[in-house]
Image (tube, helix red, strand yellow):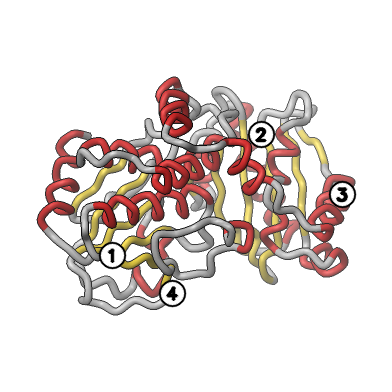
């Protein structure tokens, strides 16, 4: 780790005008780590541009970024591209992954990252990329100010499930305590993160939960959302977030699965587990990725075929 973080620190110190990017449809870790790195560069007097290939989700519109998040990329304009929280370069979106003209720094914590950058700091022991950015700030001798602290906290709670997932380590709690000492108000930020539900989302979750199913004597729980359900409730795709965790809460469930019909014959799946059950291995067989207890991907086909395919892989892994 030290060799790669040293290289990144030297690049940041000796160059200027960086493009900071994260994955499409950014979550709290992607947004928080982008913001934290931007604030670090701002303190250092460096020029930077924030980039994402998709809109910032409405549920994060309350969060203050260190600059506008652009959706257009001009090849060759920057000295380096810093890619955050992308398990592979394609996750950054077509505009960047197909046209990148600058050298790349790849900072990530996903298992299976192919190390696509000129400099790669990939460490699965970190709970989030936000935690890695805090480490980078210390390495650069940058004092974490309140905007940085709030950005890192957003990343931290997003990827640890508010400190409930298996990646919640003593180091995570130490960092969280430090961020609170730096001025973060958990009550204020947590309410902004969590209290974003619409009545349409409530209706969708109610409809979906009524149709949840158990398999393999209750070891596997599945919940599905079709385009028809979205239409009937007036909900949007983002409103499906959290359904897989609701299934994981069922007593006895080892693997929770949510299936979401994004388009005709395109099913987004999410996998969750607790303890030693490694859903990253299951996702890998389905051309997906992620972490030991939280993974996902896309299956081409209708809902029935997607359910059959994923259950075949999950059954084989649990029986093994």
Apparent side of residue 57 relative to residue 6 in the rendered image (left or right)? right
Q: Secondary structure at mark 1?
A: strand
Give the alpha-carbon distance from disc 3 to disc 1, as whole Å: 43 Å
Distance between mark 1 and mark 4 Cα atoms = 14 Å
User: Which of the two marks, 1 or 4, is nearer to us in this view?
Assistant: 1
Q: Position of residue 229 (x, y in %)?
A: 83, 62
Camera-nearest label, 4 or 2: 4
Labelled disc at residue 71: 4
Q: Between tags 3 and 1, which lies in front?
A: 1
Q: Residue at x 42, y 48 (%)?
A: 147
Q: Nearer the viewer, residue 46 or 282?
A: 46
Q: Residue at x 75, y 38 (%)?
A: 247
Badge 1: residue crowd in 10 Å (few <14, some 14–19, many ≥20): many
Which quadrant holds residue 94? bottom left
Tell me where residue 148 appears, x and y as whole percent.
Answer: 39, 46
Mark closer to the observer (2, 3): 3
In the depicted structure, whether residue 248 falls above or below residue 20: above
Report the residue marked by disc 1. Answer: 48
Give the distance between the C-alpha atoms of the residues marked 3 and 4, in whole angstroms.
Answer: 35 Å
Q: Are marks 4 and 2 in contact (CB under 8 Å)?
A: no
The CA distance from mark 2 to mark 3 is 21 Å
């Amino acid at each position: 780790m030290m060799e790669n973080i040293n290289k990144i620190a030297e690049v940041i110190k000796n160059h200027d005008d960086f493009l900071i990017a994260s994955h499409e449809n950014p979550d709290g870790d992607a947004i928080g780590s982008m913001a934290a790195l931007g604030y670090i560069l701002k303190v250092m007097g460096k020029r930077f541009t924030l980039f994402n290939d998709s809109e910032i989700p409405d549920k994060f519109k309350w969060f203050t970024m260190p600059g506008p998040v652009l959706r257009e990329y001009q090849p060759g304009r920057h000295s380096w591209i810093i890619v955050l929280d992308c398990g592979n370069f394609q996750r950054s979106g077509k505009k960047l992954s197909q046209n990148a003209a600058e050298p790349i720094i790849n900072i990530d914590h996903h298992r299976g990252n192919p190390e696509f950058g000129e400099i790669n700091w990939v460490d699965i022991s970190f709970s989030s990329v936000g935690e890695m950015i805090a480490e980078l700030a210390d390495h650069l001798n940058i004092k974490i100010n309140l905007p940085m602290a709030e950005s890192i906290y957003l990343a931290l709670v997003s990827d640890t499930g508010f400190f409930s997932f298996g990646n919640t380590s003593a180091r995570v709690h130490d960092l969280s305590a430090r961020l609170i000492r730096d001025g973060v108000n958990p009550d204020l930020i947590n309410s902004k993160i969590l209290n974003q539900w619409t009545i349409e989302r409530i209706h969708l979750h109610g409809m979906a939960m009524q149709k949840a199913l158990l398999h393999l004597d209750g070891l596997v729980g599945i919940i599905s959302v079709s385009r028809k359900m979205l239409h009937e409730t007036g909900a949007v795709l983002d409103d499906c977030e959290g359904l897989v965790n609701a299934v994981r809460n069922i007593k006895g469930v080892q693997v929770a699965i949510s299936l979401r019909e994004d388009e005709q014959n395109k099913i987004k799946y999410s996998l969750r587990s607790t303890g030693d059950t490694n859903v990253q291995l299951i996702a890998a067989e389905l051309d997906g990725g992620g972490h030991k207890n939280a993974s996902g991907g896309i299956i081409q086909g209708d809902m029935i075929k997607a359910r059959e395919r994923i259950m075949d892989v999950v059954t084989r892994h649990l029986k093994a």
